[in-house]
Image: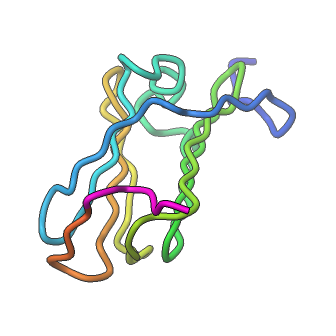
Amino acid sequence: PGGAAGAGAPRSIIRNYSWVDESRRVVKVYISADGEPAAVAAAGGGGEGRIRATFQEQSFQVDVAGDNAAHSLSISALEHKISPEGCKVKVVEGKRIVVTLQKAKEDSLWNTLVRRA
């Protein structure tokens, strides 16, 4: 009752996000309530194990377990490498989910988030 969606829940792909090359060290990805209201609502305050993030050298995935669906943002080919141990996800309740990617190489300029195939 009122728990997070299980493995059998329908998957909803998060398609609306923005990003910024914020500083010499990090790139931030924003999932806002304007573009993805269900995912942000499902994230709540970020507690209760509702958000799971996986970071690898050149990819990341964020899963949000909602009551009716599992929301997922997966980027499988980042333009540059990241340091997985320095990456994190934060929730601003009711407003946005912020994914912070730590650059593997400081001062690298990211013109795009996703590498073109």
Q: Nearer the viewer, residue 22 or 94?
A: 22
On the image, the x and y values in percent for residue 86 come to: 34, 72
Q: Looking at the image, which residue is at 23% across and 49% down?
A: 20
Q: Looking at the image, which residue is at 53% across and 64% down?
A: 77
In this rendering, position of residue 69 left or right of residue 112: right
The quadrant holding residue 90 is top left
- Magenta stretch: helix, strand or loop mostly: loop
Identify whether 87 is placed above or below 49: below
Q: Which residues are magenta?
A: 111-117
The quadrant holding residue 46 is top left
Q: Looking at the image, which residue is at 58% across and 44% down?
A: 49
In this rendering, position of residue 109 left or right of residue 54: left
Identify whether 23 is placed above or below 71: below
Quarter of the N terminus within the rendering: top right
Identify whether 57 is placed above or below 7: below
Tell me if residue 72 is in the magenta stretch.
no
Quarter of the C terminus within the rendering: bottom right
On the image, the x and y values in percent for residue 82 come to: 39, 74
On the image, the x and y values in percent for residue 8 come to: 87, 34
Tell me, what colour scheme is on the image?
A: rainbow
Q: Nearer the viewer, residue 16 or 1?
A: 16
Q: Looking at the image, which residue is at 33% across and 56% down?
A: 112
Q: Nearer the viewer, residue 54 or 82?
A: 82
On the image, the x and y values in percent for residue 79 come to: 40, 66
